[in-house]
Amino acid sequence: MDCNQCEQTPDGGCTTVGVCGKEPDLNGMQELVIYGLKGISAYATHARDMGYRDPGVDGYVHEALYSTLTNVNFSMDDHVDLALRAGDAAVDVMELLDEAHTQELGTPAPVEVPQNNVSGKSILVTGHDLYGLKQLLEQIEQRDDPEEINVYTHSEMLPAHGYPELADYDSLKGNVGGAWHDQRILFADFPGAIVGTTNCVQPPREEYRDRFFTTGLTGLEGVDALEGYDFEPVIEKAISLPSADWDQEGTVTTGFHHEPVLDQLDDIVDAVESGKLRHFFVVAGCDGPTPGRDYYRELVRMIPEDCVVMTTSCGKFRFNDLEMGTVPGTEIPRYIDLGQCNNSISTVKIALELADAFDCEVNDLPLNVVLSWFEQKAIAVLLGLLSLGVEDIRLGPTVPEFLTPEIVSMLTAEFGLQPIGEPEADLREMLGTFQPAASSAPEPADD
């Protein structure tokens, strides 16, 4: 091998893995693509488990892996194009997964979900695999054993409650906890069996290792991996454990999807034209334990009452306990939880329908996108939005370290991508002349 790009071993081999260290911008672009590929592959796996595939997405993944991981191409322009095509693939695979979910589980509808109210013999399901949850609920219903078993969702599984094919199961009771990173404390306290269905799982503590199970590709050291979707070991473990008795009042809202929102399109258009609805905010993305994420709660808390907040992903747990009500003078909810991170495609569909209704481009709408990122799925969603030409996205709490200053400058110049700042200043800028007043979404009362 003689690439003239890096130091070589005595036998002519390359001393680096991936792009050579002398090309940090190219390396950063490759990292951006690879992060996107991880998210795309996760969504494609969920869809494939339900029998849905997109050969175009699969073909792109193969090409992009070959291009980024084998030093086959050192063209910066080609990698920029590869990243935008990752965005195209992300949009396609989110469309595919949405089709799979709605075909297999029905079209979601808004619902109030009991939060942290747990009783009886219990199973907690975390991750993203809605289809796997259906298999668990079905196996519980088919049991001859009269023992009642209650199933609860965690983190990105919260949107399951909006799907009619899942909500119809009596054993699906409510949601417990918040975003993925509360696992090691929450799971130690939760008295029942626990199932990890996809990524966003953490190494377990000894307090619950023996009642933690994984499915599919998910694996943890010392944790029993289920065979396919055979949940019998989980059910038996739940029955063997003490009954839960967590009596906490409260609910969270989910299940909007784009279809129930677009059913109100005429009302939304009328509210905008009459001046009752001023602005739309998409505040979405991955949550994490890192500093700076209180920004998203403060931002949502300060958004005025004549504005709507749309969200997806687990970042919503930073603010989904705020009481936001409806836009004054309308029946339009101010808080719209569209579902999992892959349901970001619902945000796109709503924006496109609004742009069509107002005969303008998406970037001309009174709409701003503010994203939080932590891992690969958020990057796939970001690339999807950029590939659609969405501009002026704010990203935080920090810019990914693999994006060099030159890449950030390029993304800023081309798309207006920018880091978050202070919530009040950002809100003022997004709303133009708006001066934030007192909170229109009061903090929940202390227990």
Image: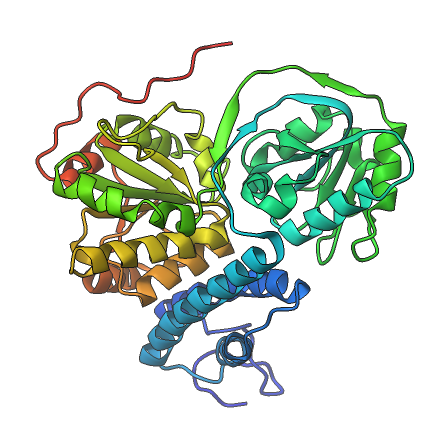
- Residue sitting nearer the eye, 201 or 319: 319
Does 273 sit above or below residue 307?
A: below
Look at the image and name its color scheme: rainbow
Q: Is residue 65 found left or right of 366 in the rendered image?
A: right
Residue 427: percent from the left, percent from the top? 21, 35
Count up the numbered dots: 0
Q: Is residue 25 found left or right of 143 in the rendered image?
A: left
**Residue 42 image-quadrant placement:** bottom right
Residue extending furthest toward the bottom:
2
Does 334 sit above or below residue 359?
A: above
Residue at image point 48% right, 50% down? 341
Residue 108: percent from the left, percent from the top? 51, 46
**Residue 328 image-quadrant placement:** top left
Q: Is residue 416 visible?
A: no
Q: Is residue 378 visible?
A: yes
Does 420 sit above or below residue 251?
A: below
**Residue 189 image-quadrant placement:** top right
Residue at image point 37% right, 46% down? 261
Does 293 sit above or below residue 325?
A: below
- Residue sitting nearer the eye, 238 or 293: 238
Q: Quadrant of the N terminus?
A: bottom right
- Residue sitting nearer the eye, 266 or 287: 266
Residue at image point 12% right, 28% down? 435
Residue 384: percent from the left, percent from the top? 38, 63
Residue 31: percent from the left, percent from the top? 46, 65
